[in-house]
Image (cartoon, coloured by chain):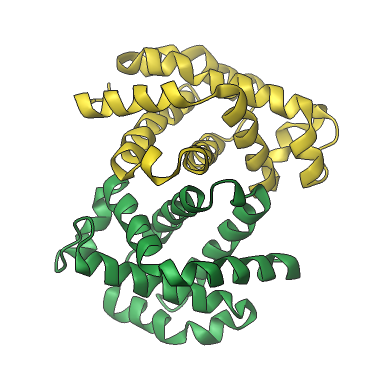
Chain colours: A yellow, B green
């Protein structure tokens, strides 16, 4: 279980409160596919993702981005139980989707960058970034935990 | 691999950031120290608190080196020679830390540039910083 200080809990909840899942989610997933093109291997069924423009305009990518980002809600609401919250999802990513868990770390880094671009230095200062990244690390760890 | 367009974009971006090298560099360092406390072990001889003169001058130095490299990326191997030697034989910073700094630099750039930190700029910058870090570690062993 992760030890959260009161300041960390406050920072995470505050940041989550500002984030528009429908806006940041699609951006983050699109950037994953653009910045780390090998991640496209999981999205063959999403239609045209052959150029940056295609990726940025792809509705399936956008919709999936919203779903993934929205998935963080459960973790924010259950900071003391993140491992349990993502147990089934971890099994799914391992046994059904076969995603390299390192991809979770890459997406987490990109989410933080998108949050930075949206809110600027004042919106996510170094301490807030540290708390947010600690949160995302717990999520990433939970998602990789059921792999075998 | 960086395309010609990407190299031009990177040179352009860093050219614009040079006047605020101190702010950009110190912000990235501070973010790295906050998120990855282990990185502070390399700076026990300096005062790295927010806005300290050490933090500002060190941040400036780093950004100036990155910006200089960006002006002629094809010559990175030649231009980074002295810094390669410095890092390999004197500083001996574990190269895994370069990744941590690069990530924090990307966050700083995103915060600073907002919408101008487009997916294309993001990809190009990520690739450049990776190449820069790899080049820096080349003489380690």
Q: Is residue B83 left or right of residue A21?
A: left
The mark total stands at: 0
Q: Position of residue B75 (x, y in %)?
A: 60, 83
- Which residue appears at 37% of the width and 42% of the height? A122
Q: Quadrant of residue B73?
A: bottom right
Q: Position of residue A137 (x, y in %)?
A: 39, 33
Residue A57 drawn above or below residue B135: above
Q: Is residue B33 visible?
A: yes
Q: Residue furthest right?
A: A48
Q: Quadrant of residue A27?
A: top right
Q: Quadrant of the C terminus of chain B?
A: bottom left
Q: Quadrant of the N terminus of chain B?
A: bottom right
Residue B114 drawn above or below residue B28: above
- Which residue appears at 61% of the width and 28% of the height? A23
Q: Position of residue A143 (x, y in %)?
A: 48, 24
Towards the viewer: B87 or B15: B15
Towards the viewer: B128 or B84: B128
- Which residue appears at 27% of the width and 47% of the height? B34
- Which residue appears at 35% of the width and 77% of the height? B88
Q: Is residue A86 visible?
A: no
Residue B107 drawn above or below residue A129: below
């Amino acid at each position: 279980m992760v030890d959260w200080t009161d300041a960390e809990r406050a920072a995470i909840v505050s940041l989550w409160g500002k984030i528009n899942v429908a806006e940041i989610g699609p951006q983050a997933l699109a950037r994953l596919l653009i910045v780390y093109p090998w991640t496209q291997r999981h999205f063959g069924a999403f239609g045209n993702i052959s150029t940056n423009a295609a990726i940025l305009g792809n509705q399936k990518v956008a919709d999936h981005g919203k779903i993934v980002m929205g998935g963080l809600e459960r973790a924010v609401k259950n900071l003391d139980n993140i491992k349990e919250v993502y147990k089934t999802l971890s099994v799914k990513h391992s046994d059904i989707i076969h995603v390299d868990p390192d991809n979770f770390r890459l997406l987490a880094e990109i989410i933080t960058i998108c949050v930075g671009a949206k809110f600027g230095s004042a919106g996510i200062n170094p301490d807030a970034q540290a708390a947010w990244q600690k949160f995302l690390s717990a999520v990433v760890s939970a998602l990789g935990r059921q792999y075998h | 691999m960086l395309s010609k367009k990407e190299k031009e974009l990177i040179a352009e971006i860093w050219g614009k950031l040079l006047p605020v090298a101190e702010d950009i560099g110190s912000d990235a360092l501070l973010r790295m120290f906050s998120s990855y406390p282990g990185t502070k072990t390399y700076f026990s001889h300096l005062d790295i608190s927010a806005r300290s003169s050490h933090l500002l001058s060190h941040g400036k130095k780093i950004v100036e080196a990155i910006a200089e490299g960006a002006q002629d990326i094809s010559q990175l191997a030649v231009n980074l020679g002295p810094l390669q030697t410095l890092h390999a034989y004197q500083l001996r910073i574990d190269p895994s830390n370069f990744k941590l700094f690069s990530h924090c630099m990307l966050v700083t750039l995103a915060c600073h540039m907002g919408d101008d930190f487009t997916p294309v700029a993001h990809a190009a910058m990520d690739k450049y910083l990776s190449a820069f870090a790899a080049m820096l570690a080349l003489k380690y062993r």
